Image (cartoon, grey):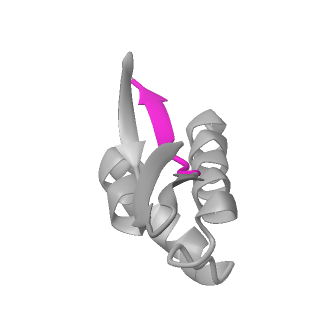
Amino acid sequence: KVQRERAEVDGVEIDFEERHRYFIFKNGRYFTVKSKSSILKVLADENQALRQFIKKHKIRFKNNQDTALPRTAAEYDRLKKMP
């Protein structure tokens, strides 16, 4: 959470804004992912297959990160388990 302070006539008003951060653990490191391009950059070894998956399932990252990022990561895991 991020604290924001605003000066008001009768004092200071404090708000807390909740922010979500998403990470992918790959090759012993954590990578921050925020968007379609950042997740595809981290998972570059399956880039083409993930692009096809995203297009086929009409996954939208801009307004729906909470489901788009995990679905894409799950598909990557599935692709890696395939022989």
* Residue 58 visible to an observer of this rendering: yes
Q: Quadrant of the C terminus?
A: top right
Q: Quadrant of the N terminus?
A: top right
* Residue 46 percent coordinates (x, y): 42, 52
Q: Residue at x 42, y 28 (%)?
A: 26
55 and 68: which is toward the camera: 68
Q: Which residues are magenta?
A: 18-26
Residue 24 in magenta stretch: yes
Q: Residue at x 33, y 51 (%)?
A: 44
Q: Residue at x 58, y 51 (%)?
A: 18
Residue 19 in magenta stretch: yes
* Residue 24 percent coordinates (x, y): 47, 36
62 and 38: which is toward the camera: 62
Q: Residue at x 39, y 63 (%)?
A: 7
Residue 58: quadrant of the picture: bottom right
* Residue 14 percent coordinates (x, y): 52, 52
Q: Is residue 75 left or right of residue 39?
A: right
